[in-house]
Image (cartoon, rainbow, N blue to C red):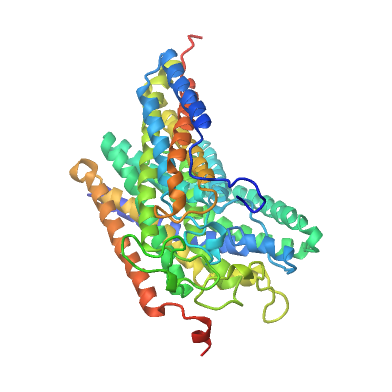
Amino acid sequence: MEEIVLGIGITALAGALATVAGAAEDTESDIGSQGDPNSQVQLAPQMGYIHRIFNKAISGEPPAYGAWCVIGAGVAWALMQINYNPALAIILGAVIAVFVQGIYCTSGYLGRTASLAKFQQPVYIDIIKSLTPVTMAHSFVAIFCTVAMCYLMATALHHPFALPLLGLVWGIALGAAGSATGNPFYGKERQYQNQKFGAGVPISASGNIVRYAEAGQRSSLDNGWFTTKFAGPASGICFGLIVFLELWRTVLFEKMMSGWGAIIMGIVLILIFTFIDRWIEVWGRKTYGPYGTTEEASS
Amino acid sequence: MSALGGAAAGGEGINPTGTVVGIVILLVSIAATYALGFSIIPLIGIIIGGALIGFGVHFVPVGGAPAAMGQAPGIATGVAMLAAGAGLAGLFGGAWAYEATGDFAVAIAGGAVGGGLMMAITCMMVNATYVFAMGIPAASGKVDKDPITGDTFPAYKSQGTEGHGLPFISFFGGVIGGLIAGLGGTLIYIELLEIYHVGLPAIMQADAAAIEPLAISMAGILAIGFFLVNAVLAAYNITGTIEGPHDPKFKRVPRAVIGCAVASAFCGFISMLIVLNTGM
């Protein structure tokens, strides 16, 4: 019984860490323009729209976060092997991973922007100076929380995988959850704020991203400010739910029916999310209704 | 014909020459495994697991960059990325269940449910983002009517786009894809673990209990590697984006299953060589 109570506490803590990690990951990827919407940041100068948005799609978010979390977890694991305090080891691991991330950010921005030289897109040194530390700070939070969560799984919940392997698995899952949930909000709602609300961006508008703010040119910091209103927290909830429910169903129901309890609970959870998804879909159709023709919409 | 006047690329057909070459590689890998004195049962399990991952990836609705602008339906990330995320979440659950129960069926089912649960939560949050934050209803660009719910889509598709969000059939595809991919990944992990569990103590001349963490780590890291090999192969077959099982691109799935089986056979053979006892 005591073991289960401890397990539930660890599950809750891991879920909370995952939620913070998801929110920080998405905000980092939006400020740094890491995910799929960066295709438009790269495309804009080619269409004649010069901008001051950070441009560092080093790779997809899942492999990028897989790499950074495995570096953080690997260094932390190595330090713990020589008897470092786990908290200190995880912090040092995350710091080293963040420096790797910062190097990738800088070379990513310089490389991608320099490739746009023939379209007269300048390389802004002040963007590197002001935004790289911001993305590094957010990714520190994401990596630290993910590695700490993996440490809890390995030591308190006795998962068979070693800490670096858990870092790789959950780093990739973190990037997948964050990019899936957060990308549309950054891509459509922020980069194409000049398009109609409640409709997709017409393909003919591709590249015409919003480049000006209330005063002066828009900075990627403004994008971070905007996306933390929905995309960051939503990504956090997504990743937090994945981690929490995956652990919860195992910790509580693993012992029931010789292991089948956790599986039955997993199927029940999938069915619950299926019903919620269907409700959201129907709610959207009923509330917004079908799109009218251009004449109807203008009248 | 493509815009450049060449033959259309990425069709549904199976290239007979390529398939024969692939099957030869597969058979040679199995024969070489047998000739070196290994049991071929684990390799067959790895081949089935790889084929399942390739099959499962085709169910996952992936919209890539266009989905991030609400220009196409699906989840706004890469095919291989998302499938790997779901499959690895499944692998996490499956490995844990195998450690706790030692039951093959429970571990496989645990891996499948782990992948399915990850996809169910992710797909739900994608729809929540489109509907609640962006005011955009779900609409497929490939079919006019949802095969499961019967919802019609043309009127719900905004002008100048190919659809957006995740219609129910895509959500369903995502969950099924996560289930199958998680199952395949866990199957590969368990087969590799069985090989290393026996093979590593023999070649390192050490106690099996002392080698156990190494065997688990090697099986885990190679299972992730197998996962990425098969997910990327399937992504090449999909070429960009896919909406789910109702997408015409889904018909290409036999080609991916053959390709993934061949790649898994060869990679499986290589992964067995690690524990080849040469008597040195």
Q: Nearer the viewer, residue B117 or B259?
A: B259
Residue B151 appears anywhere in the view: yes
Residue A10 shows in the view: no
Tell me: A237 left or right of A123: left
Q: Exactly how many numbered labels are in the figure? A: 0
Residue A250 percent coordinates (x, y): 30, 48
**Left or right of B233, for residue B195:** left
Using the rendered view, name the quadrant where residue A209 is placed: bottom right
Residue at image x 31%, y 37%?
B98
Residue at point 48%, 51% (across, down):
B82
Residue A13 appears left or right of A102? left
Nearest the eye: A28 or B175: B175
Q: Position of residue B218 (x, y in %)?
A: 46, 31
Q: Is residue A47 left or right of residue A81?
A: right
Query: In this picture, is A12 found above or below A263?
Result: below
How far across and how far down the image is residue A236, in percent? 46, 62
The residue at the far top in this view is B279
Q: Nearer the viewer, residue B274 or B68?
A: B68
Closest to the observer: B213 or A271?
A: A271
Q: Position of residue B108 (x, y in %)?
A: 31, 39
**What residue is shown at x 51% (from left), y 44% (from top)?**
B237
On screen, residue A225 above or below A125: below
Q: Residue at x 41, y 16 (%)?
A: B34
Q: Residue furthest bottom?
A: A299
Instruction: Looking at this view, name the residue that lies furthest to the left.
Output: A257
